[in-house]
Amino acid sequence: MTLWSVHGDGRGVRDGDVVRPDERMSWPLTIGLGVQHVAAMIGATVLVPALTGFPAGPTLLFCGIGTLLFLAVTRNRVPAFLGSSYAFVAPLAAAREEGPAAQLGAVLLAGAVLIVVGVAVKALGVRLVESVMPPLVTGAVVLIVVLALAPQPAAAFSKQPVVGALTVAVIAICAVGTRGLLARLSVLIGVVIGWVAGAATGALADDRVSELAAAAWVGLPQLHAPQLRPSVVALVVPVVIVLIAETVGHMKAIATVTGRPLDGAVGDALIANGAATTLAGLGGGSGTTTYAENIGVMATTRIFSTAAYAVAGVLTVLLSCSPKATALVATVPDGVVGGSALVLFGMVALTGVRIWQQAGVNLTDPVNAIVVGVALLAGVGGVTITIGGATLNGIAWGSIAVVLGYPLLRRVRAMRRTSAGPR
């Protein structure tokens, strides 16, 4: 049985057409698309372990394996790359002094809880999620995750604005002003040209270049075993709410841009993400989630083939086994990372708005306006609060605010109307 049928002649996509998840382009083009997906996610994926004290090698290894596992569990229906989740950054950074074993124990348990949620959704139906996360909530979560992370690419862009602007310009020109291969690989081309320009102008960091020269070509990632500690576990349990919101938001975003409903795959997606996170916790990687950057790539290229993600997963596993390759990735100038991320994050932010538009969400309704307004400002503003030793960042608080605040305010309004009686 063939996993993917070839779209058209495999060399081009007509204007207004899309490549479905069960289709693929020619293998050379598909490999190029896989490289582009790796280029889109690599900066964010290696940043999370850097912030939490995890090594980059195991994180890349389990992101690659997790992506392949995700494609298998969702039966090739959902195009997604599983990268490091920013929702884990604050709690794992707070638990850094406890050591990597305790941190991994927390990641392991978070993944196990997510699997349980996925099984419940699969058994009871997608309405279980829809009742908790209607379009208002999923659109808001997409915006919260993207906008809360926006300062990072903006800061990177600001460090090297010339290189960053060149990267944005190349991506835009290739995506809008060309057709065929150049248009489909616009992000990768922008990153490569930006890197070359950075190397020519001295924008590559000297220490990273030195590390590249000294790195070995082949080397297996060093794995670690987890250890469950209640004090650390308590820090990441709330992260499960964010992971659910991110996964459902990803599914809604993909359904929006492809025009094909994916409600039947939500349970499988949650199980797959939970299994990937659990596997990462068992071996030394940070928790995983579906990546907004890759949605941006798909929105730009209009190619949603899971074949490209299978290639990206394999390439990521190979990258994790080459210290030289990971060191090469680290040499990509900050301006290039920032410029490409601005394009991709912007595309995803607009996807969140499209979810509202297609569902007819009324933002003039006081309940909707208050919930979305507070949640967005909490996420974008970076609200960080510590309760009982658990520190949650803006993404967590914003997601919690919209997931819990929306049904609560709706209930308050319903009670007011009931107590007022008929007029």
Image: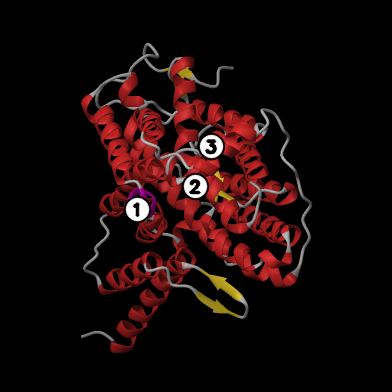
Classified by dominant secondary structure, the portion drawn in magenta counts as helix
Q: Which mark is residue 209?
A: 3
SS at mark 1? Answer: helix
Q: Is residue 172 above or below residue 158?
A: above
Q: Is residue 115 left or right of residue 337?
A: right
Q: Is residue 159 above or below residue 322?
A: below
What's the CA distance linking mark 3 and mark 1?
24 Å
Q: Horizontal and vertical percent for residue 12?
A: 33, 17
Nearer to the camera, 227 or 169: 169
| Residues drawn in magenta | 154-159
Is 158 included in the stretch rendered in magenta? yes
Task: Specify the amino acid type for callout 1.
Answer: Ala
Q: Residues within 10 Å of mark 2 (few under 14, many from 20)?
A: many
Q: Residues within 10 Å of mark 1 (few under 14, many from 20)?
A: some
Query: Which residue does the image show at 70% across and 46% down from the upper left?
Result: 279
Of the numbered discs 2 and 3, the one sitting upstream in the chain is 2
Q: Quadrant of the N terminus?
A: top right
Task: Specify the amino acid type for callout 3.
Answer: Val
Q: Residue farthest to the top?
A: 9
| Contact, mark 3 vs mark 1 (Cβ under 8 Å) | no
Is 140 included in the stretch rendered in magenta? no
Query: Which residue does the image show at 27% across and 70% down from the upper left?
Result: 369
Residue 294, by quadrant, is top left
